[in-house]
Amino acid sequence: MSRLSFTDVLALGFMTFALFLGAGNIIFPPQVGQSAGVAYWPAALGFLATGVGLPVLGIVAVAVIGGGLDKMVSPLPKIAAALFGLAIYLSIGPMFALPRTATVAFEIGVVPFISLSHNVGLMLFTALFFTVAVILALIPGRLVDVIGKWITPALIALLMIIAVATVIDPQGPLGPTKSDWQNAPFSRGFQQGYLTMDTLASMVFGILIVTAVKARGISDKAALTRYTLYAGLIAGLCLACVYLPLTYMGATSHSVAPEAGEGQLIRQYVHALFGTTGPLLLGVIIVLACLTTAVGLLTSCGEYFHRLIPKLPYRGTVIALGVISAVIANQGLTALIQVSVPVLVALYPLAIVLIALSFLRRFMRAPRPVFCWAMGLTLLVSLLDGLSATGIAALSVPATAIKIRLPLGMQDAGWIVPALIGLIIGWLTQPRDTAGDRSRS
């Protein structure tokens, strides 16, 4: 087969959308809107840049490179490549993203309907949630059929009901902009998009999309890249159609959900829109969205750790990841978010630079010096950003004092200039004898 039917392409796009649409994609856009208020549009566009644009570029970069994260980081020294890959997979896997799928599903989709104590309910739900997710992850060959053709269309339909209702019947006017958002709503929205973890996940999910395209009989590299791009664009369009109404929901929520915490804002707003049926509708959406993301993450992380340590069987690794994620999920949603923020703030600039370098790689005589200089200088500043976001005065105060002196540091983009300087230095220092580098790239 050299061509995919429209139905197949649509199924791939829906599968990609479902893999990305998880916990953070639903709870963070309303928080962005509530903080931005009347500055809704620049904040929403910033969030779309990291929540839609970068993930689409990430999965296309995987197709262009012709491999997953391992191949993307191959120009780096082995130890640096291994540490970066491990940091990505731990972040989107058992440390943060995987546990968060269960905690968000529980907080929004289950808590309103149970009378058990919070701790007992969370423990029972996480055990059930990850049992189902592990079972689905152990049959990855059916991922497109189960997710792309059945779960996702139902998910999109339910989300569209909430989106249309929010736009037609907003529960208040646009609220005020919080003081710390007034000067740079776009950059604040841009950084809030980090919390979705989608750019990190794109370098992992990309290989799932490429594999799914290959399973349909497509082997030509140009066709693989084209169909992966189509799947990414469909997923990106669907994500944008979710994010914009949810951000608008937050911007108009000040009268029905003032100062609501993570997960509570959307629950209170939907209740105001639909009455007692609102929490049920939202619960179905949240559980489906979080479950599909958990399946994709378990599959990707299981394959990664199996490749990293071949003695670890895939099935056993997936089961172990499910158990570890369930244990960590019982720490609660607020604790998971607080711990994840500094790590994501430090990792995201590196991921963005890696994706950009992957597109430029075909033009490099010798990729290694370019990758090392660009990502090395980016790392120095991204570590400052991470320390600044810890909230621990002994770490955040001196780190913040340094980073705000950098170009674009006040806009939380101080890593851009060092990355460009590293790119230029690396490009100019490429050796002219590139036979060995080309064979490795």
Image (tube, rainbow, N blue to C red):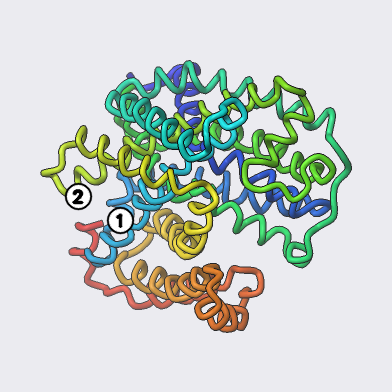
7 vs 18, nearest the viewer: 18
Distance from disc 2 to disc 1, alpha carbons, whole Å, reads 9 Å
Pick whichever of labels 2 and 1 is earlier in the sequence.
1
Left or right of 282 on screen, residue 313: left
Q: Quadrant of the N terminus?
A: top left
Of the pair 430 and 372, the residue shown nearer to us: 372
101 displayed left or right of 438: right
Q: Residues within 10 Å of mark 1 (few under 14, many from 20)?
A: some
Q: What is the x, y in percent for residue 355?
A: 44, 55
Q: Residue at x 19, y 64 (%)?
A: 435
- Establish if 310 lies above or below 17: below
Give, as a three-letter code, the residue at label 1.
Leu
Above or below 312: residue 335: below
Per the image, the residue denoted by label 2 is: 308
Describe the element under mark 1 as helix, strand or loop. helix
For the residue labelled by badge 2, is the local secondary structure a helix, a strand or a loop? helix
Q: Quadrant of the C terminus?
A: bottom left
The label on residue 249 is none
Disc 2 vs disc 1: Cβ atoms closer than 8 Å? yes
Residue 55 percent across, percent down from the top left: 50, 45
Q: Is residue 223 visible?
A: no
The residue positioned 45% from the left and 72% from the top of the image is: 383
Q: Nearer the viewer, residue 32 or 352?
A: 32
x, y percent for residue 99: 42, 43
Residue designated by label 1: 86
Q: Residues within 10 Å of mark 2 (few under 14, many from 20)?
A: few
339 relative position to 262: left or right: left
